[in-house]
Image (tube, rainbow, N blue to C red):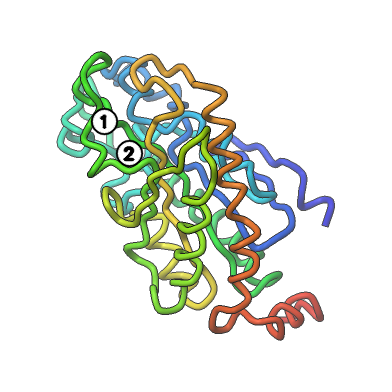
Amino acid sequence: MSESADIRQEDLLVERIGDGPVIATAIHAGHEVRRELLPFLALDEATRAREEDPYTDFLVKVVPSWIVFRRSRFEVDVNRPREEAVYTRPEMAWGLHLWKRPLPETEIERSLDEYDRFYAELERVLRLLEQRHGCFVVFDIHSYNHRRRGPHAPPDDPRMNPDVNVGTGSMDRRRCGPVVERFVRDLRAYDFMGRHLDVRENVKFRGRQLAQWIHRRFPDSACVLAIEFKKIFMDEWTGVADVERLEELRRALESTLPGLMAVLPTLPGCGAERETDAHGTGDH
C-alpha cells in the first residue's frame, strides 16, 4: 500500500490515503480563487480569510488519510447543496458583498464543475476505505468565529459557543451512537493546557452537505463527525495562530483515536468478520 500513502496534489485538493479506518477532511481550509474570478471579486482578502477555516489543514493530518480542499468557499462551497454552492447573493454569505457585478453563467458552471470533481474524488476515496475496512469514521473538520463583535469586544456567550461542537445531525444515531459518545468523552477528558475542553453535540452546528452526502451514500459504513473548533487557537481578526494551542488541539484530537478504533468494530455490520473479508479476496 506504499504507493497509496503518497501525498497527491492537484489544483482542487491535496490528499493522502494511508492505513486505518479514519479519514479527515478540511474543506474550508482553502483560500485560492480562480484567476478568471479575480476581476469580479469585491471582498477584501482579510474578510474572506476570516470566514474561512485556516489551520484546519494542519489538524486533519492527525490521521494517516486526509483530504484538503484548496479552493476558497467563496469560489465554491462544497459544504452546501450544489444549487447553493456558489454564493451569488449577500444573504448566502453572511451579508457580505462578494462580487462587483453578477458572475457570468459560464464561470458559475466552472465552479460547479469543481464541486462535482471534488465529490467524485471523495466517493472514490471512501469506496476504497469501505472496501478495505468495512466501516470508517470521517472527521469533517471546521473552525468558527466567536468574536464577531470586534477584536476588542467580549467574546460571544460561551453557553452557546463550546470549544468543540460535534455535529451529528444527519447521522444514524442508533448505529453510530457509540462512536459519538466515545469521541466526546475522550476529547473532554484530555488535559488541555490545565483545563478540559467544552465539547458538546449539535449546539451551534449540526453538520451540513459533506456529512449529509456521505451518510446518504454510505448509510451502512460511514460515521461522520462534523467537528467545529472554536477559534481559540488563533486571532480570528488578524489570522495569526497561537501555535502552542493549535498543536495542543491536534494532540487532543489524536487522543480520541484509540477509543474510536476500539468501538468501531462493535457497530452493526462493522465486525471482525467483515474486516477479514475486506482484507481477503478484495471482491465486493
Q: Earlier in the sequence, mark 2 or mark 1?
A: 1
Q: Is residue 42 above or below residue 269?
A: above
Give the crowd class for mark 2: few <14, some 14-19, many >=20 residues within 10 Å: some
Point out residue 225 in the picture as x, y percentages from the top left corner: 45, 57
Q: Position of residue 55 (x, y in %)?
A: 51, 30
- Could you tell me how many numbered marks the image carries? 2
- Left or right placement of residue 196 versus residue 137 in this view: left
Marks 2 and 1 sit apart, C-alpha to C-alpha, by 7 Å
Q: At x 15% / y 36%, what residue is drawn?
A: 91
Q: Look at the picture and state if 250 lies above or below 45.
A: below
Image quadrant holding the C terminus, namely: bottom right
Q: Please state the horizontal and vertical placement of residue 222, each as a whole percent of the image.
A: 51, 68
Give the residue at the far front of this rendering: 194
Q: Amino acid at mark 2?
A: Ile
Asked whether the beta carbons under mark 2 and mark 1 sit within 8 Å of each other, the answer is yes
Relative image position of residue 231 (x, y in whole percent)? 39, 31
Q: Residue at x 38, y 45 (%)?
A: 198
Residue type at mark 1?
Leu
Q: Which mark is residue 103?
A: 1
What residue sits 23% from the left and 43% below the top?
159
The residue at the point 69 percent across, 49 percent down is 64
Horizontal relation, residue 195 to residue 145: left or right: right
* Left or right: 246 in relation to 100: right
Label 1 crowding class (10 Å Cα cut-off): few <14, some 14-19, many 20+?
Answer: some
Q: Up-down: is 58 above or below 283? A: above
Looking at the figure, which quarter contains the N terminus?
Answer: bottom right
Quarter location, residue 99 = top left
Say which residue label 2 marks: 108
The local secondary structure at tag 2 comes to helix
